[in-house]
Amino acid sequence: MVDRRPGNGRRPLRGRAVIDENLWRELEAPQPDRGRSTRRLFPESPHDIHLGVTHPGRRRMLLLRAGARAADLVRPLLNDLPQTHGLHLSCSSLSARDFELQVSLTADALREVFTPLAEDIARTVKDAPGDTVLEAAVRRFLHWQQLMRAVGVDGLGKEARRGLYGELYFLREHLLGVLPQVTAAEAWTGPEGTNQDFQLPTCAVEVKTTVTKNPVTLRIASERQLDDTGASRLFLLLVSLDERRGGSGESLNTAVDRVRSLLDSPAAAARFDTQLARSGYFPHQRELYDEPRYTLRRVDLWDVNSGFPRLVEADLPDGVGSCSYEISISALERHRATAEEVTELIRGTDG
């Protein structure tokens, strides 16, 4: 099989790996012979990471080449790798010393999932130690498999849908329009499992969403969620919604589309799609998210500062961890903050 690399002589993709449909279409351009078109990602990385498209079948792939030691380390994971419909992972030898890991798209229904998956794996492995690079890629692929199984055929559960809607609301109303698009999209870190949903140089924001008419308490997931260690300022935002089927409210799909319509930066749009997929929102399941509809009832904002009722890691005795707890909303009154205050801090991120 012959490698053909469109754009040889052009500068490879640097910095952010912007994998979008335009790049895929360039790689899918008809070729006279059998083979594959490739484009290198992260050329500053010591690892050989490429996007690829086969010809004439036009199968999309992420390709990662490494040495024999890396291949030996990854074989135990490959032996027990579960199958996922529409995705295929394999490792083949190119020579006695060189091996290639291929992550391939085998079902068109997952085309829009494959792009953030490929970019996420590429980002994960670009700085990995040499001998562990293939293992890191396979473990990240396993993470995506587990995420897709957890979401299942019914899509995100009610709580997850509400939580995602609340995060999209904050992204749309408080970050986009205030910050450059890429900066705003990169501030949304919750889907990566960070302690807070949004992290910026000037502040961090944890978003809670509820459909309870008059909530009395807020549930905090862990002792790190309201821990401001390393954050300049920390805010807690509560988005209160009315939820119903039908009506004039906004569906989760509409919220996604409204954010996407604001992103004319390919890098920001790619980051946004990756974070949606990490949240469990997959494009091939869009029909599941036309209902319910959400209408904003109110937004409450608090400054997590001195005296704020919370548990943090430093408060816990040795041997105690992974604590969830509830805080009384009535105890937060003196910690209220304004949207204008937070907006000014956020604006300072771009200063």
Image: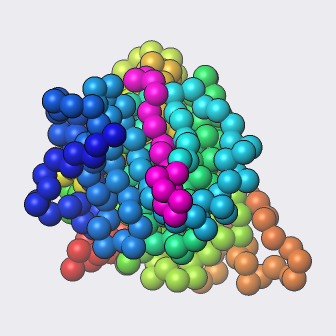
Tell me the residue at 13%/52% (across/down): 7
Can I make out residue 319 in this image? yes
Most distant residue in the left direction? 9
Instruction: Decide: is 92 above or below 339.
Output: above
Instruction: Decide: is 240 above or below 301.
Output: above
**Is 250 placed left or right of 302 in the picture?**
left
How far across and down, in percent of the image, does residue 183 sit?
A: 28, 64
Q: Nearer the viewer, residue 37 or 223?
A: 37
Tell me the residue at 71%/64% (across/down): 222
Tell me the residue at 73%/78% (across/down): 313
Picture quarter with the C terminus: bottom left
How far across and down, in percent of the image, does residue 281 sit?
A: 48, 36
Asked if residue 195 lies in the magenta stretch, the reply is: no
How far across and down, in percent of the image, does residue 287 sit?
A: 45, 18
Tell me the residue at 48%/43% (across/down): 103
**Is 247 placed left or right of 153 in the picture?**
left
Query: So how many labels did they put on this image?
Result: 0
Picture quarter with the N terminus: top left
Most distant residue in the top direction? 246
How far across and down, in percent of the image, does residue 221 sit?
A: 69, 58
Instruction: Decide: is 158 above or below 93.
Output: above
Asked if residue 96 lies in the magenta stretch, the reply is: yes
Q: Which stretch appears magenta? A: 93-109
Q: Nearer the viewer, residue 209 or 261?
A: 261
Which image quarter: residue 255?
Answer: top left
Q: Nearer the viewer, residue 263 or 139?
A: 139
